[in-house]
Image (tube, rainbow, N blue to C red):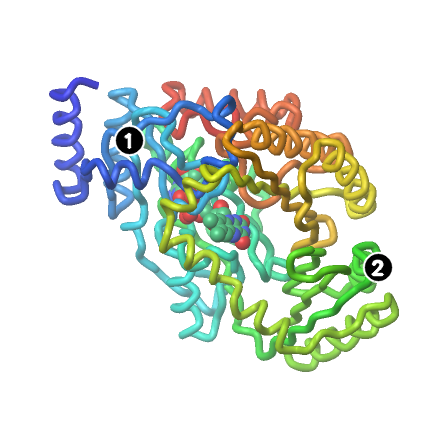
């Protein structure tokens, strides 16, 4: 874009939001051109071109977003919505010159309705700010990811994020009752904030996990929950992953539903065996009965109880990594430049296939000479993760090997009837696997996208659309 066109664009945007909320400083553009996808997780051969945004615009109201989108549509300039910028798949990465829509200024908590168990908020509200406000009213949000202090409601809905306590409260998408969104043509879509409707298809689904490709979420009405009277946390050590997995399956078979379930065989933390952390929360009597039942199941399956302080410390420190990320975003983005690479998979599988997948994955990982640091479950027995790593001395061969291993594992999960990603979305990182994931479904998504956004202005190049 020529410099006169560029300054014309800034002037027109300034008329909408005021000059102070149109940012063009190079350092700011650079900072917001990346989310939390690090360079080490994208091999140079597979990395899309990146570009600085033309400018960053900070709207405060839905009407301002509407005017910005209309202008972008008229001028055919892509829009990249940006919440907390903590997305791990490059959903908010600037891959072409764009107007970057920084939604963090839309941070009003509009209503908390404790009788309806719902809250209506602007999309840029940071989850932790909402959580604190709800706690004052003896309620909780229920959605509690590592990134509670940085992620926004709009970003969490757009990635259909999963948090620590999702076992009883669901994913962020499950908590959505109603949404307000500005669509590519500038029209406003408002869905009704009710628990259940059978009046046609659920249009919230266009935006939940939509990564800003179908509309910009400006407001959300979400479910909230009365603060639990009690929470009981406990930890167990099992000799093997299979033993611990059997205990988890027994618990679900007996209809126990822990709010928190974190199970894994992290070799760096524990030399051998696998550790299970459980958290039950709700009414005191129920929680005590559930925790006692879980203890006896774990004992029957050979689990030994860890000191209570360990599980409590694990839960207390769950947001520490996100706070570190906020202090040093830049360093995180450059991870991998030292020739040490890490990546992970978070796949959803039928519970009956988790152990078979884990065994087949171990064979692939060994064949490809990649190191497996950890495998585990989060929230449900179906949600399985692996953390892998490798290192080289600047040749990038190890990075490529790691990336190809990840791809092979994700394809294996798809072949076994699973989904390649249950929590972080697709962005640019997993876009090339969307055809295998959805088959004709990807074509359906592309047609919807084409119809709603014929000029392709909303976050183009993401999700394989
Ligand atoms: C250290 C660390 C720990 C993490 N832990 C977790 C975890 O426990 N659970 C989990 O699920 N994820 C986790 N993540 C990933 C990340 O925090 C989540 O994906 C989060 O939901 C992203 O929210 P955000 O506001 O930062 O979104 P962003 O990164 O800003 O955006 C995410 C996507 O949504 C789009 N978007 C943002 N706002 C809007 C809007 N209003 N309307 C439309 N589109 C929008 C963006 O364009 C992008 O495609 C973690 C990340 C890090 C760095």
- Which quarter of the rendered picture does the N terminus lie within? top left
Q: Nearer the viewer, residue 370 or 281?
A: 370
Residue 303 falls in image quadrant: bottom right
* SS for dot 1: loop
Residue 202 falls in image quadrant: top right
The residue where tag 1 is placed is 53
Q: Residue at x 58, y 60 (%)?
A: 164
Q: Horizontal placement of 351 versus 55: left or right?
A: right
Q: Position of residue 337 (x, y in %)?
A: 45, 37
Crowding around mark 2 (Cα neighbors within 10 Å: few <14, some 14 to 19, many 20+) is: some
Above-or-below relation of 113 to 344: below
Q: Residue at x 38, y 29 (%)?
A: 458
Which numbered disc covers residue 460? Answer: none
Q: Residue at x 45, y 21 (%)?
A: 451
Which numbered disc covers residue 243? Answer: 2
Q: Position of residue 277 (x, y in %)?
A: 68, 66
Above-or-below relation of 16 to 318: above
Q: Could one spot residue 189 in this view of the protein? A: no
Q: Nearer the viewer, residue 419 or 388?
A: 388
Q: Horizontal placement of 258 versus 209: left or right?
A: right
Q: Could one spot residue 390 in this view of the protein? A: yes
Q: Horizontal placement of 15 versus 348: left or right?
A: left
Q: Nearer the viewer, residue 261 or 216?
A: 261
Residue 56 falls in image quadrant: top left
């Amino acid at each position: 874009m020529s410099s006169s066109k560029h300054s014309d664009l800034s002037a027109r945007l300034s008329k909408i939001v005021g000059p102070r909320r149109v940012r063009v400083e190079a350092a700011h553009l650079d900072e917001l051109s990346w989310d939390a996808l690090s360079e080490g997780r994208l091999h140079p051969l597979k990395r899309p071109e990146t570009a600085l945004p033309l400018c960053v615009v900070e709207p405060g109201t839905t009407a301002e977003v509407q005017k910005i989108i209309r202008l972008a549509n008229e001028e055919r300039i892509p829009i990249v919505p940006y919440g907390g910028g903590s997305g791990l798949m490059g959903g908010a990465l600037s891959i072409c010159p764009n107007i970057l829509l920084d939604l963090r200024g839309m941070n009003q908590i509009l209503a908390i309705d404790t009788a309806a168990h719902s809250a209506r908020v602007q999309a840029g509200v940071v989850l932790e700010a909402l959580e604190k406000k709800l706690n004052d009213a003896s309620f909780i949000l229920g959605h509690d990811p590592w990134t509670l202090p940085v992620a926004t409601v709009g970003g969490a809905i757009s990635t259909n994020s999963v948090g620590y306590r999702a076992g009883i409260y669901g994913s962020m998408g499950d908590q959505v009752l109603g949404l307000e969104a500005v669509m590519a043509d500038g029209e406003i879509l408002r869905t009704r904030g009710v628990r259940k409707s059978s009046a046609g298809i659920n249009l919230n689904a266009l935006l939940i996990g939509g990564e800003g490709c179908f509309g910009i979420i400006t407001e959300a009405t979400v479910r909230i929950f009365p603060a639990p009277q009690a929470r009981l946390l406990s930890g167990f050590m099992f000799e093997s992953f299979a033993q611990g997995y059997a205990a988890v399956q027994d618990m679900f078979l007996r209809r126990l539903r822990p709010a928190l379930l974190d199970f894994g065989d992290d070799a760096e933390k524990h030399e051998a065996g696998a550790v299970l952390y459980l958290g039950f929360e709700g009414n005191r009597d129920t929680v005590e009965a559930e925790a006692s039942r879980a203890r006896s199941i774990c004992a029957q399956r050979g689990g030994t109880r860890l000191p209570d302080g360990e599980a409590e410390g694990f839960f207390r420190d769950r947001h520490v990594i996100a706070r570190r990320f906020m202090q040093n975003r830049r360093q995180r983005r450059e991870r991998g430049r030292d020739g040490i690479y890490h990546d992970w998979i978070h796949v959803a599988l039928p519970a009956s296939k988790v152990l078979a997948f884990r065994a087949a994955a171990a064979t692939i990982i060994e064949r490809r000479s990649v190191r497996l640091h950890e495998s585990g479950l989060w929230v449900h027995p179906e949600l399985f993760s692996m953390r892998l790593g490798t290192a080289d001395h600047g040749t990038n061969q190890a990075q490529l090997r790691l990336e190809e291993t990840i791809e092979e594992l994700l394809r294996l999960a798809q072949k076994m009837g699973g989904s390649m990603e249950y929590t972080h979305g697709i962005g640019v990182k997993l876009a090339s696997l969307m055809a295998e994931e959805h088959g004709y479904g990807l074509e359906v998504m592309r047609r919807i996208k084409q119809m709603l956004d014929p000029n392709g202005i909303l976050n183009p190049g993401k999700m394989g659309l």
